[in-house]
Amino acid sequence: MLTPPPSPAVCAFDVGSADTHPRTWHLVFAPGRALLLGSGRLPVRQEAGSVMLWEPSDALRLSAAAPEALEPVRALVLHVPEAALPVRGEVLRGLSGRPAPTCSGPAALLASFVTALAAHVPFPGARHAARLGTAAVNLVTAFLEAESAVRGDVGGTAKPDGDGAAAPVHGDEAAVVRRAPEETAGPLVARPRPVPAPSPTDLLVRDIKAYIEHHLGDTTLTPTSIAAANHISVRYLHHLFRRDGRTVGAFLRERRLEHCRADLADPAQAHRNVCEIARRWGFRDPAVFNRTFKTAYGLTPGAYRRRPFPPSRTGQLGQH
């Protein structure tokens, strides 16, 4: 997540394209002296002691603001997946390319944390790295929310800076900071709305549910292990599932029960007894399984199995 300070006078990072999943945003810290970020005729000047959010679709190229200086270019770059940030994409784009001073507030806390983090890599153990990653995401979120409030960004539209920490090397700030909205020509015409593409958060939820589905037989599967496997915090995992109006545990239980019910109704699984089917889908305690199954379907697993099932009912599964 953290790129150590580069030593050459000019360095470029391969940060992928806008179509890359997961999309990753970059926070660039200038601890030593001023930097120029970007390429082409409109780079962005970043003063020493500032931090700047950089968009995934833009090439990240660092160079010295004063090329004649003898010191090498130094920067810290924190990479954060967009799906881990509870901040709307339009707000992120509105803040991209706008340096902010790190002398006070959330920006100062974030800069201090990242600087200390860089001084102690690599970490001795994945458990500590995961907790530190969660802390970094929380600090980044606080910084972005504070910047959005200060700049008056609403719906991803940012107001021009007042006396910001830095300005583009050349004019036309809108061209540097963010892509201008497309101009509309001619009269407005009602058009069918295109089907929106899945957001990074939707893709993350889909991947997490697929992971759960493939590990239902693991009796040690818990929100903690699910979050760790998908590189997010347990708190953020619960936040994602609240969008569906249910908990992680409820989703896990429903999927296990659905598979058990399908097996009980499937003649091809007649050679397995009820306890085997329960264990196959992650239920360790037969008594708990019987009670949970009856609560969900109104019958014990044995009574449900003895019911006659039409062929069309057998083995039908679906995520809710």
Image (cartoon, helix red, strand yellow):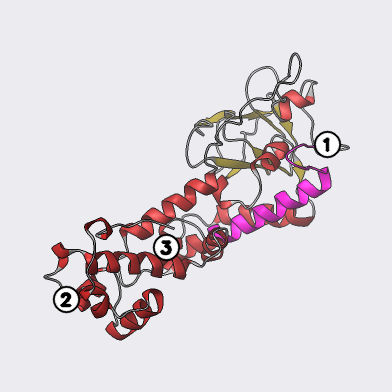
Disc 3 is placed on an element classified as: helix
Q: Quadrant of the C terminus?
A: bottom left
> Mark 1 = which residue?
159
Which of the two discs, 3 and 2, labels the residue nearer the N terminus?
3
Label count reads: 3
Task: Tell me the amino acid under the disc marked 3.
Answer: Ile
Q: Which amino acid type corresponds to the residue marked 2 in the rendered image? A: Asn
Q: Does residue 240 appear left or right of residue 105 in this picture?
A: left
Task: Determine the residue positioned at 56% across, 65% down.
Answer: 235
Which residue occupies the foreground of this view, 27 or 10? 27
Left or right, residue 252 beside residue 277: right
Q: Is residue 285 above or below residue 156?
A: below
Residue with the mark numbered 2: 273
Residues in magenta, as a range: 133-160
N-terminal of the pair, mark 1 or mark 2, is 1
User: How far apart are the alpha carbons under marks 3 and 2?
Assistant: 29 Å
Q: Position of residue 285 (x, y in %)?
A: 29, 82
Q: Residue at x 64, y 57 (%)?
A: 113
Q: Position of residue 238 (x, y in %)?
A: 54, 64
| Residue 1 seen by the camera | no
Q: Is residue 65 above or below residue 258?
A: above
Residue 126: quadrant of the picture: bottom left
Q: Residues within 10 Å of mark 2 (few under 14, many from 20)?
A: few
Q: Where on the picture, by quarter, is residue 185?
A: top right
